[in-house]
Image: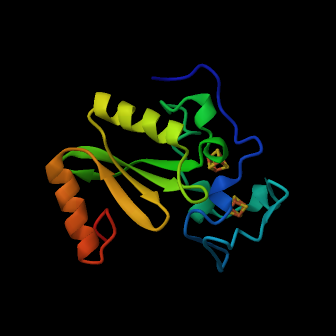
Amino acid sequence: MSRDVTRTCGSCTACCDGWLQIEVRGHKVRKGQPCPFSIAHRCSIYPERPQHPCREFVCGWLVASSPLPDWMRPDQSSMIMLAANFFWRGLPVDVVVPVGEQPKKKALDWLTRFCAENRRLLVYQIGDEWFAFGPPMFQTDIASRLARGETPWGD
Ligand code: SF4
Ligand code: SF4
């Protein structure tokens, strides 16, 4: 599904606010530790923001081909989607990182329905715990990776 209107971030700064673990010009951005250049819901160095990670970041809501509805803007749905972040047996796996403690229920319900209808797989985080949505074998594989101390994508 594509959209006619190009989206803009508006007042969302979810990807700069510490929900993604990134490093910006030597500053570690973590939960409770937003990017120091994010000021009053704006990037204060936007024209000079670094290539990595800022310009390279692909937001699953902002990207032109996003299937996510308008109301799922990350700051409003409490989730950032990293679309097709990795593949499992040839199927794309979307990764959802919460903005806050957990994604809003309405957003997660929408996304799991979308993934089921489109044969996409999903891993999402609530608090510090990862959950897998997909067939039992996928869930078992992800649980094994987590039990080995790996990330869901196998790092
Ligand atoms: S999370 Fe997406 S919509 Fe929000 S500021 Fe980042 S790129 Fe923009
Ligand atoms: S430098 Fe700007 S775009 Fe990059 S994380 Fe910080 S506030 Fe966001």
Q: Is residue 107 left or right of residue 111?
A: right
Quadrant where the C terminus sits is bottom left
- Return the x and y of residue 72 as percentages of the image width and height: 58, 36
- Return the x and y of residue 135 as percentages of the image width and height: 19, 44
Vertical order, 107 against 97 (above or below): above
Residue placed most toward the observer, 109 or 20: 109
Q: How many marks?
A: 0
Residue at 55% x, 54% y: name it: 57
Quarter of the rendering containing residue 43: bottom right
Q: Is residue 144 left or right of residue 56?
A: left
Vertical order, 8 against 15 (above or below): above
Residue at 51% x, 42% y: name it: 105
In the displayed orientation, state which residue is furthest to the bottom.
26
Ligand 2 lies in quarter = bottom right
In the displayed orientation, state which residue is furthest to the left.
137
Q: Is residue 116 left or right of residue 105?
A: left
- Return the x and y of residue 17 as percentages of the image width and height: 68, 62
Residue at 45% x, 23% y: name it: 1
Vertical order, 40 against 65 (above or below): below
Q: Is residue 18 left or right of residue 103?
A: right
Quarter of the rendering containing residue 74: top right
Residue at 20% x, 52% y: name it: 138
Residue placed most toward the observer, 49 or 151: 151
In the displayed orientation, state which residue is furthest to the right.
40
Quarter of the rendering containing residue 55: bottom right
- Return the x and y of residue 108 as percentages of the image width and height: 46, 41
